[in-house]
Structures are given as C-alpha cells and as structure tokens.
Image: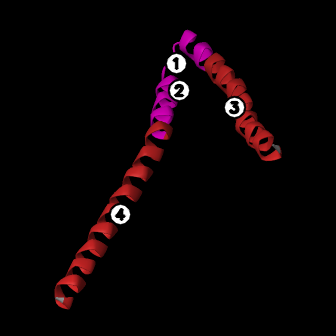
Amino acid sequence: MKKIVFLLFSWLIPTMSSFAQCAMCRATIENNVSNGEVGIGASLNFGILYLFVTPYLAIAVVGYLWYKKSKENNAKHQRKRHIAW
C-alpha cells in the first residue's frame, strides 16, 4: 500500500508544478503577441514540438537497434543449428 501511495504522489507532484508553468508561459506569450512580437511564440511552439518528438525518436532508435541485434542473434542461431545437422 505504501508503494502505491508513493507512486501516486511521485506521479502527481510534477504534474501540479507543470500546470503553473503553463499558465506563466501563456501569459508571457499573450503579452508579447499583444505587443506585436510573435518570435517568442514561434520559438515556444518549436520547443514544444522538439520535446514532443524526442522521446519517440529515442524509442524508435532503441527499437531499431533491438530488432537489428535480434535478427543477428537469430541468424547466428540458425547457422549453429545448420552446422549441427
């Protein structure tokens, strides 16, 4: 039970602080856009896309390397089986 409570709090605490940052960023962007500056908004959107894509790229690279290594091990295993016959 203690583990479940710990995991719940460790999952919720970072989420709570991220809501506050989002409101601060939104206020800053709205203020800059109302003054005619759109560069910061474009940079923030690029940063959001960067943070969104990075984990998927990392997972794709790990998956590709895993697939490649698995295929090599399978081929090596097949050669051993062929030699044993």
The residue at the point 83 percent across, 45 percent down is: 2
Vertical placement of residue 45 versus 79, above or below: above
Q: Quick check: is 49 in the magenta stretch? A: yes
| Numbered tag placed on residue 37 in the rendering | 1
Where does residue 70 sit, x and y in percent of width and height?
Answer: 32, 67
Tell me whether circle 4 and circle 1 mark residues in contact (CB < 8 Å). Answer: no
The local secondary structure at tag 1 comes to loop
Q: Which residue is mark 2?
A: 40
The crowd level at tag 4 (other Cα within 10 Å; few <14, some 14-19, many 20+) is few
The local secondary structure at tag 3 comes to helix
Q: Choose between 37 and 43: the one closer to the eye.
A: 43
Nearer the observer: mark 3 or 2; the answer is 3
User: What amino acid is labelled 2 in the image?
Assistant: Ile
Which residues make up the magenta segment? 29-50
User: What amino acid is labelled 1 in the image?
Assistant: Glu
Tell me whether circle 1 and circle 2 mark residues in contact (CB < 8 Å). Answer: yes
